[in-house]
Amino acid sequence: MTSKPSPARMPVLFVGHGSPMNVVEDNRWSRGFASLSGLVPMPKAILAISAHWFVRGTYLTGQTNPKTIHDFGGFPPQLYEIQYPARGPVELARRVRTMLGEDRASLSNEWGLDHGTWSVLRWMFPAADVPVLQLSIDSQLSATGHYELGKALRALRSDGVLIVGSGNVVHNLSDALRRMGSKSSPTPGWAQRFDNTVAQALTERDTTKLLSLWPGTEDGQMAHPSPDHFWPLLYAYGATDDHDAVQFPTTGFDLGSISMRNVLFG
């Protein structure tokens, strides 16, 4: 891993994490995760927003040693043996709580780092030598509410904090599982259209369009039967501004209905 000199402020990432198997397989997606470390400066800490901490309320991991959560079932035993022992930056957690509003955010010791976070970071920073804080996704908030929380995080970028949203631009798991046994997994039209529409909205910085896509469009509802994998993108986007360029280091679909698009802002 090579790191760049620290800039005036850190870039922001959104990563399409996909299947937990990407943690142990050498494939196009895992190589894409690994390559991200060369596209960002070495952070002082990481704030991750994962699709898999989707609860009623806004919480921050408050432990000095957050546990590695294996929040999946039916996978090979080797996946459950993986640990990602990154330190928990408790002082940063307290600061972020203040930034978000102490009346609406709390510290929690009930969660840790789930696979939406560590499956990506294990490739980017395999030594687990960067402190990691995870932020929950409040299932009760609208798209605008998540975007506004992302905006509140912008100042962290000037302090060497890498903000990483982890989900998928398209995530229709039931459709993807139906395709798993087939020899080919063509991407359905609604999935490709939604992925393209999101990419266009990000490139053009069309906030109104981006916030209207779920649940306001038919393609959006097909792409996300539940919005948990879409909301992390809004946190990442909210933490950026008009000065941030947009790049897509990895694009493509896994099992037809899982977009593996990664987004680099800044």
Image (cartoon, grey):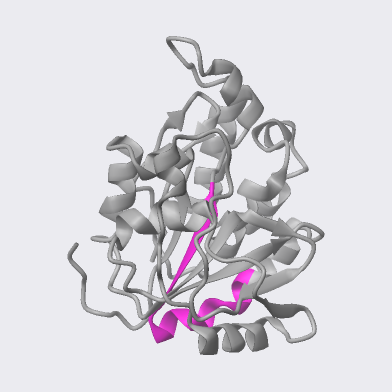
| Residue 111, image x, y percentages | 63, 66
Q: Residue 5 at what x, y percent from top left?
A: 21, 78
Instruction: Give x and y (percent) for residue 116.
Output: 51, 52
**Corner quadrant of residue 100:** bottom right
Q: In which quarter of the view is residue 97 placed?
A: bottom right
Q: Say which of 66 and 46 sits in front.
A: 66
**Would residue 263 be visible to someone looking at this image?**
no
Q: Is residue 250 above or below residue 184?
A: below
**Placement of 254 over or under 231, stated as above or below:** above
Q: Quadrant of the N terminus?
A: bottom left
> Which segment is the magenta one?
150-167
Is 223 placed left or right of 217 in the picture? left
Residue in the foreground of this view, choosing between 51 and 111? 111
In the shown orientation, is residue 250 left or right of residue 104?
A: left
Q: In the displayed structure, does residue 249 sit left or right of residue 227?
A: left
How many numbered marks appear? 0
In magenta stretch: residue 157 = yes
Asked whether residue 164 appears in the rendered view, the answer is yes
- Viewport quadrant of the C terminus: bottom left
Residue at the (41%, 76%) spot, across then down: 131
Rendered position, 212 above or below 89: above
* Direction top: furthest residue: 183
Tell me which residue sits at (48%, 38%) in the image: 19
Q: Position of residue 246 (x, y in %)?
A: 41, 56
Residue projecting furthest to the left: 2
In the rendered structure, does residue 139 fall within the stretch colored magenta? no
Residue at position x 51%, y 19% from top? 180
